[in-house]
Image: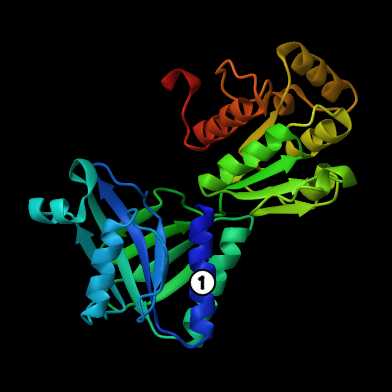
């Protein structure tokens, strides 16, 4: 789940509370090349306003044209875009791409608002949830995701959508590399949080980044690392980096990394074991040296290698698969 989809749910909740009926669209599956993955969302209302993305622009236009014609008024239905050669050319879907989209038309009522609030809480929470929808009746429910599986599943007129926390990047301390990491991470839709208690580092606020003027270790220990969290320590200051790493390895964060040379990393590993009492298994969770080996030297290049490595792990790619 990306930060853009969190904005979709937040906007849907706001519009429903204002009394607007909304269309909530979710990509169920893609065939061929498609810009957005299953689970991507968009919300729209009758006046044509919308937030989110299904394809990067072409499918959105076709969807809004349908709304203008008074179509898509069923509580739940599945719409396929790009099936014919003519439609693929008209929609400019690349490489013969086909999208299957769940379209929900929901009136503004308390039950729908409560459901959206549950989705929003799940995206900011610690545990995955699952949306279950009946295509025949339009009924919807939200439950704990204890089965796992694909993001979107359709079977016997029922749709199951897994909802997890938005991809979060925690910057343990600010530095030139951290600033570039924030920029790259925001560009790919991450929620970015920076923690740094040093007043001198607060002079240049970063756009779209939530800054907490506390030690990163305190923020992490407060339960702010969920399973879609990457924590990167990029300051070269052991007082900030080491404490953050000691706390991060005790969380479900999927990526934990620290900047430094191989020699520096070896010394850090020894220090974390001796001073922090970390086990070999906990130290093995830490990516150090951090990032892909791109021969990077400049801060922007190092940041690029860090964010690329975070994405590699997030998508389950081994280094030898690149």
Q: Horizontal placement of 210 versus 273: left or right? A: left
The image quadrant that residue 176 belongs to is: top right
Q: Nearer the viewer, residue 67 or 183?
A: 183
Q: Horizontal placement of 2 versus 194: left or right? A: left
Reply above or below: 308 against 263.
below
> Where residue 143 appears, x then y in whole percent?
51, 65
The image quadrant that residue 300 belongs to is: top right
Q: Which colour scheme is used?
A: rainbow
Q: Residue at x 75, y 35 (%)?
A: 175
Q: Which residue is drawn at 69% across and 49% down?
A: 206
Q: Is residue 322 visible?
A: yes
Badge 1: residue crowd in 10 Å (few <14, some 14–19, many ≥20) = some
Where, quadrant-wise, is the C terminus in this rendering?
top left
- The extreme top residue here reads 263
Q: Nearer the viewer, residue 255 or 307?
A: 307
> Where residue 141 appears, x then y in whole percent?
45, 72
Q: Residue at x 51, y 52 (%)?
A: 2
**Dot 1: what SS?**
helix
> Where residue 84 appears, x then y in whole percent?
10, 54
Reply above or below: 30 against 9.
above
Which residue in the structure is indicated by mark 1?
A: 11
Q: Is residue 251 visible?
A: no
Q: Horizontal placement of 189 versus 64: left or right? A: right
């Amino acid at each position: 789940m990306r930060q853009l989809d969190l904005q979709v749910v937040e906007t849907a909740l706001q519009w429903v509370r204002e009394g607007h009926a909304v269309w909530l669209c979710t990509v169920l599956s893609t065939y061929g090349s498609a810009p957005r993955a299953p689970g991507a969302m968009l919300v729209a209302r009758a006046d044509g306003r919308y937030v989110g993305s299904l394809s990067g622009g072409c499918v959105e236009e076709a969807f809004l044209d349908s709304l203008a014609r008074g179509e898509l008024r069923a509580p739940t239905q599945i719409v396929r875009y790009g099936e014919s050669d003519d439609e693929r050319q008209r929609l400019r879907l690349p490489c013969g791409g086909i999208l299957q989209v769940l379209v929900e038309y929901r009136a503004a009522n308390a039950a729908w608002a409560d459901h959206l609030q549950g989705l929003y809480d799940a995206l900011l929470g610690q545990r995955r949830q699952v949306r279950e929808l009946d295509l025949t009746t339009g009924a919807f429910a939200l439950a704990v995701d204890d089965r796992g599986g694909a993001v979107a599943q359709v079977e016997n007129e029922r749709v199951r959508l897994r909802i997890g926390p938005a991809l979060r990047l925690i910057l343990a301390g600010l530095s030139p590399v951290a600033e570039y990491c924030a920029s790259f991470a925001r560009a790919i839709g991450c929620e970015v949080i920076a923690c740094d208690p040093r007043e001198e580092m607060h002079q240049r606020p970063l756009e779209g980044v939530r800054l907490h003027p506390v030690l990163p270790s305190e923020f992490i220990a407060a339960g702010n690392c969920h399973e879609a969290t990457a924590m990167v320590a990029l300051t070269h200051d052991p007082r900030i980096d080491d404490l953050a790493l000691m706390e991060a390895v005790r969380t479900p964060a999927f990526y934990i990394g620290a900047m430094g040379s191989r020699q520096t990393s070896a010394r850090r590993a020894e220090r974390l074991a001796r001073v922090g009492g970390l086990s070999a298994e906990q130290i093995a969770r830490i990516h150090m040296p951090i990032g892909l080996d791109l021969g990077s030297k400049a801060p922007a290049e190092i940041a690029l290698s860090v964010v690329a490595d975070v994405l590699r792990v997030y998508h389950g790619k081994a280094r030898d698969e690149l």
